[in-house]
Amino acid sequence: MEDMKEYIDRYEGIQPAHFAFYGQAIRFNLESAIASVQFLVQCLEARNAEEDPHSLTDPILDSIQSILIHTASLSKYFWPINKGINKVHKKRAQSLRKAFKIKSNSSIRNKDLRNHLEHLDENLDSYLWSKPIVGNVYPAYVGPEMRRDEVPYHFFRAFFTDSGIFESLGLRLDIQPIIDELYEIYRGESDGENT
């Protein structure tokens, strides 16, 4: 790859014939995230009509986690971890952001989200061993956000229906901007803008 510097620079990290490969990779994560959003909406609507709304807690949290995992994977195409030899990864990412019209302040860029999900096993170890786990412990919660008083609250996965906030091990994310961005990219992809 070192002898390809001239071509990497000329084609800004992606040869024209290779763009379809990136498009397919992005499409997978994007469509998977969108399918999870649609399932989430169905679950939330069903939860409102359900006699036992707790029966949908895991499907709701699973769909949110799926949205976020696919978003984190998607963000790697647009913001790589390292620059690569001859800055190929950096140039490819810049080309893709330009082609998909993604702004540098995009909500899918969230490094905290990426790091949290990619290292969830390690984050869980650190969280559970960093201090005594006392107070209110919720492995899975869906409902309105409760008033936090002096007693600590611990959530492995929680979705607060009144605020749209997802919380996991202290990390809090407003998922609506992420969903909005996913649909913005999806609409552009569906319109054929990015091919």
Image (cartoon, grey):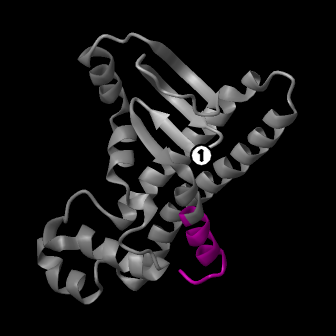
For the point 75% across and 22% down, the residue is 55
Above or below, 72 against 106 in this view is above
For the point 26% across and 68% down, the residue is 89
The quarter of the rendered structure image containing the N terminus is bottom left
Quarter of the view holding residue 86: bottom left
Instruction: Say what secondary structure mark 1 lies in.
Output: loop
- Amino acid of disc 1: Gly
Image coords of residue 153 (percent x, y): 45, 21
Above or below, 83 against 146 in this view is below
Taking the view exactly as shown, the residue that stands out farthest to the front is 149
Image coords of residue 167 (percent x, y): 48, 36
The quarter of the rendered structure image containing the C terminus is bottom right
For the point 36% across and 12% down, the residue is 133
Does the magenta-highlighted stretch encompass residue 193? yes
Q: Is residue 193 left or right of residue 105?
A: right
Taking the view exactly as shown, the residue that stands out farthest to the left is 2
Image coords of residue 128 (percent x, y): 33, 17
Residue stretch in magenta:
181-195
Towards the viewer: 127 or 66: 127
Towards the viewer: 85 or 186: 186
Magenta stretch secondary structure, dominant = helix
Total tally of numbered discs in the picture: 1
Image coords of residue 30 (percent x, y): 56, 60
Label 1 Cα crowd, 10 Å radius (few <14 / some 14-19 / many 20+): some
Towards the viewer: 111 or 27: 111
Above or below, 33 against 65 in this view is below
Q: Is residue 192 left or right of residue 80?
A: right
Q: On the image, numbered disc 1 is attached to which residue?
A: 164
Above or below, 151 against 68 in this view is above
Does the magenta-highlighted stretch encompass residue 13? no
For the point 12% across and 72% down, the residue is 2
